[in-house]
Amino acid sequence: MRATCETCGQVQPPDWQPGDLCVHCGAAVRREHRCYWCVKYTPDGKYCRHCGAGQIPAEQYAAARWLKHVGSDQFVIPPRLATMEPDQIAHFTRLYEAQGNVIAQHVQGMQLAESLLRQSGGWAQAWEEAILPRLPLPEEEMELLLMPPLGGGSDAERLLEIRDESPLPIARSLASLARLRLLLATDISFAEAELWPDFQTARTHLNDRDLILQGEAGITLCHWRLLMEQISYSTEYQLKSAVYAASEGPSRVEAHTSIALFDACNRPGPQPVLPEALGSANPDIAFAAALASQAPDALHAALRVPLRRFAAALTLTKMGADFDLAALLPGFNSQQISKLLWTISQQERPRPDLRPLLLRLLNSKSLSRYEIAPVEDLMMLDLRPGDAVRLITLYPVPYFITKVLTSPSLPPGEVPDVCYELLRYDLFDPLQIPALNTVIADGALPISCVPTMVGMAPVNSFRNLENLVWEQLRTHQVGELQPLHRLLRGFLTNVAQSELVRGWANRLLTGWYEGDYQADRPALTFTEAAARTYFATFQEFVEDQVYLLENPADFQTLEAGYRLYYPLQEVRDVTDPALVNAPLATLPSPLLHRLRTALVAFVNEQGEWYPRQGALHILNFMRAHQPWQAEAQATLEAMRGGYYASEVERLLAN
């Protein structure tokens, strides 16, 4: 039974009473009931206006449908029911209503969902009109429609049961859309409300052939809470097309506002809205319009409303408006805080007012990488002492370390501490972190830090330190370089050290010792000027050379170990014996004796010619110094007939 207006044809609400006028147009209303034969609604009377079947009392409808099912003729059913025993009518009624109640359950569920949506697509009525003429159904078909009774006490609970239990796709879809509408009006979180399946279902209808359902999905997914808090859409065209489907119907204002808000979330600046949207009686539409148009007064007022506070704060933040965000942030959840901080970080404006919160978040163990990233970015806009090391410790990966090192707010004095931290993580690698090359080239690391870094570096990091050490050797004076120089010499001469480290030190030192004519730095050799370019004193240089000459076995397996003797080779280019003899004369006699003995042994060992030729030149230069003349002459005389006899003879002949 239902009541329908005789003028506008609209169905009256369930609480309609006889004598009431149409709630839509005020005209007279007539009562209607379903015809047992064609199942269409027909006014009270003797015959159905559609199929002509005789009418029966409404309470006999179920029994009449069953009689039709078992084969009774259209014209036989009314008189047969009139003479049938009440118990038999009740029996046929129970048989039919066993299925009819299942259908009613589905219809009521869909009607519940439809009542919460913005648009009425008549989905429940359409399904009911399609299924009722087929009742009763075969048992196998009926089995597919069975569903547990709804037990939820609230609309949200009943909609959840329909979404999860209904065998009807349209019922599940309507329930999902209704749940979104219902729960978005509350302050319940998306995770707590289990809205993700509903959101996914709504997305599947953005291209639906049913334009009303498509439009409903579109404006639902453009609800301001979804756009501002939760969802990022990659299918802009698809979503807008769905909303446009609702833009000319009863949801015109909401549809246009939804499009404006979507654009505001994905483009800079305010978006135009319909004038009636800002003043809408629907608070969701009015607030969405304020968000889209960036109306400052409405947004500041919304900061006092818990459900709208985050969306208002996010929009005001995008606008660059002044408000006490630091006081509001603790009241937001981690996802909301992250979204706000991402927005602020993209503005690249330091926010010292947020520093206490940022520090608390940095120390939190529960945040994801996505949530902590904007915190780090904001910290880098206003780095204070200790911040850089703290950040690298939290996220020691190359691309992030590069961001720290290139941050304009990084205090210069923090660079050494950052580099120490990189060495602890074995990450001091200019290939992976190109910003280290800039640090090295700009001299951001004081020379006093470099020996410490070399001393603490893991073995695998030595090659990565090569450019740093070379830059220090190339650009600093001998006095500043002595701690580093002694450290490298210590690596080189320590046979307990790994061959990798010793070879690394040898490569750096011998490359440095070769000199740089562009920088007017002479190659290392046995002259005062050359030796003092690299060593603190000439005596220290000679002691170093004597050690090399006296312990050749320690350096035989060293990669390019022969380059250690290049200072001897350079003596060949010295033409004035006094340049060598004068500093040699300042040496203690025992050291001078060791040098002469070591040079003779070096020559007699045979090997690479040029360094040994240089050693013979030193012995020959000693003949030019009167106190050493006799001994030097005797030394060379004793080397006649040896492997290098021709060079000895040439020197003695001059």
Image: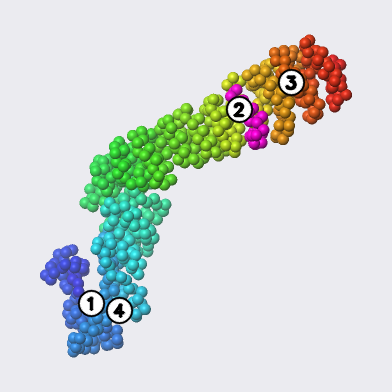
Give the image location of residue 633, x and y in percent.
83, 15
Which kind of residue does numbered mark 4 sit on? Leu
Asked if residue 6 shows in the view, the reply is no
Along the viewing direction, whichever of 289 and 551 lies nearer the viewer: 551
Question: Which callout, 3 or 4, points to the residue nearer the camera?
Answer: 3
Residue in the image at 16% along x and 64% along y:
23
Residue 400, above or below 70: above
Q: Which residue is mark 4?
A: 135
Q: Secondary structure at mark 4?
A: loop
Tell whether label 2 touches label 3 (CB within 8 Å): no
Residue stretch rendered in magenta on the structure: 481-504
Which kind of residue does numbered mark 2 sit on? Leu
Residue in the image at 33% along x and 64% along y:
163
Q: Secondary structure at mark 2?
A: helix
Q: Which residue is mark 3?
A: 594
The label shown at residue 487 is 2
The label shown at residue 34 is 1
Along the viewing direction, whichever of 368 and 486 lies nearer the viewer: 486
Asked if residue 139 shows in the view, the reply is yes
Magenta segment includes 489: yes
Tell whether label 4 touches label 2 (CB within 8 Å): no
Tell whether label 2 touches label 1 (CB within 8 Å): no
Give the image location of residue 115, x and y in percent.
25, 62
The way the protein has been coloured in the rendering is: rainbow
How packed is label 3: few (under 14 Cα within 10 Å), some, or many (20 or more)?
some
Label 3 and label 4: CA atoms lie apart by: 118 Å
Q: Secondary structure at mark 3?
A: helix
Label 1 and label 4: CA atoms lie apart by: 13 Å
